[in-house]
Image (cartoon, rainbow, N blue to C red):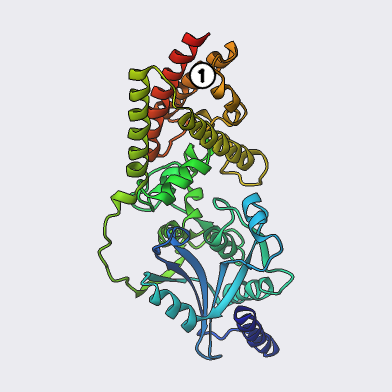
Amino acid sequence: MQKKLLFLCLFLFVEIIQGQQNILSEQAEISVLTIGAGTSLNDAFGHSAFRVKDPVKGADLVFNYGVYDFETPNFYLKFAQGKLNYLIGFNYYEDFFEAYISQNRTIQEQVLNLSSVEKQKLFDYLLNNIKPENRGYLYDFFYDNCATKIKDVTNIPLNNAIVFKEPKDFKEQTFRTLIQNNLNNNSWGSFGIDIALGSVIDRKAKTEDHMFLPENIYKFFEVATIKGNNESLVKKSNVLYKKMEIPTPTQFLGSPIFVFGIFGLFILYITYNDFKKQKQTIWLDVTLFSITGLIGVLILLLWFATDHKGTHQNYNLLWAFALNILVIGQLFKQKPSRWFVKYLKLLVILLCLLTLHWFMGVQVFAIGLIPLLIALFVRYIYLIKIHSQRL
């Protein structure tokens, strides 16, 4: 309710500006704000926004393309399906600035080198974009987000005349690497991304596609020029706030590789005991087949039942095999069907294929999975042995 009230007040403010012919003064400046990474996963990649400052009119507004409405009907379902509309939002600059300072996040500003006509055209576009009927857009993490919107909208008043050059120390990288550069590889956020996103993000990103990250918007804008006059796109750059470095404690004991390491050792320990006693711990196998099967179903849904592009061609299915959920009944049989032994051999082959995919760079998998994959391989080999003896 408070957010809606704030938006209404700001919208009325803009309406007042529009009532004053919506004309920026000669002293007005439009700049791009780049916000540094935060502490949570959704803040880990930073943020971008436009700032419109007109000291003559007393206006200092921020427009950003990273707002969503939690009251949207079926919000979580639409989010999971990739059908959730994001919105352009706007704030008073002072409120925007204070909010990110309170989060201890670096704020950098790049004042755009635009003529009065170009500034007016950009401002008019933003004002039209915040109208309720125009605010929404279908979000895409890689191609249509808060950062790519900055690139696309800045090009509008310049008639697509921006020439983007490779920044200093630019290195061509895959989409996954660009994401993981902002994360700890042994974190749950990194682990979840590597499970949910498929091999499509393991291809090299085109030069301009690097700008799906706010930090790269800043780097590319710094060296960009305007076609025709060859002037720099950015007139000047400022650091408005520099985050205070606060040491963060390591959390290895709660990390994926530690948790799955313990789980993997547990599986290997039970398998060793089973081998000595020539028996099968059925509850363990039911647990493993249930978990891997359900994760496989989820991966299939993300691939085929959503509009997310990054979840396609996900070879995590080679270990999280969805059919596992359907063969659990075979684990309870004293004498399993002959095809079940062949099925177990297939699971071993799939794990070998996963390793091959990893080494060949077809898809990079979560490092936290390594202990689990080793344990699954050993467990499947043992199940093949014991069920073959029962035939």
List x then y, in percent, for residue 205: 48, 43
List x then y, in percent, for residue 218: 42, 62
Quadrant, the N terminus? bottom right
Where disc 1 sits, the SS reads helix
Q: Residue at x 66, y 61 (%)?
A: 75
Relative depth, front residue between 29 and 60: 60
Residue behind mark 1: 344
Left or right, 183 with reference to 252 = right
Residue 28 makes an appearance in the image = no
Relative depth, front residue between 144 and 304: 304
In the displayed structure, 4 sits above or below 258; it is below
Relative depth, front residue between 374 and 110: 374
In the displayed structure, 22 sits above or below 112; it is below
Q: Amino acid at mark 1?
A: Leu
Q: Residue at x 28, y 71 (%)?
A: 244
Left or right, 81 with reference to 35 = right
Q: Residue at x 58, y 60 (%)?
A: 152
List x then y, in percent, for residue 183: 38, 52
Residue 12 makes an appearance in the image = yes
List x then y, in percent, for residue 194: 46, 42
In the displayed structure, 152 sits above or below 134; it is above
Mark 1, other Cα within 10 Å: few <14 / some 14–19 / many ≥20? many
Please tell me in which quadrant of the rendered image residue 117 appears: bottom right
- Count of numbered circles in the view: 1
Q: Residue at the right extreme?
A: 133
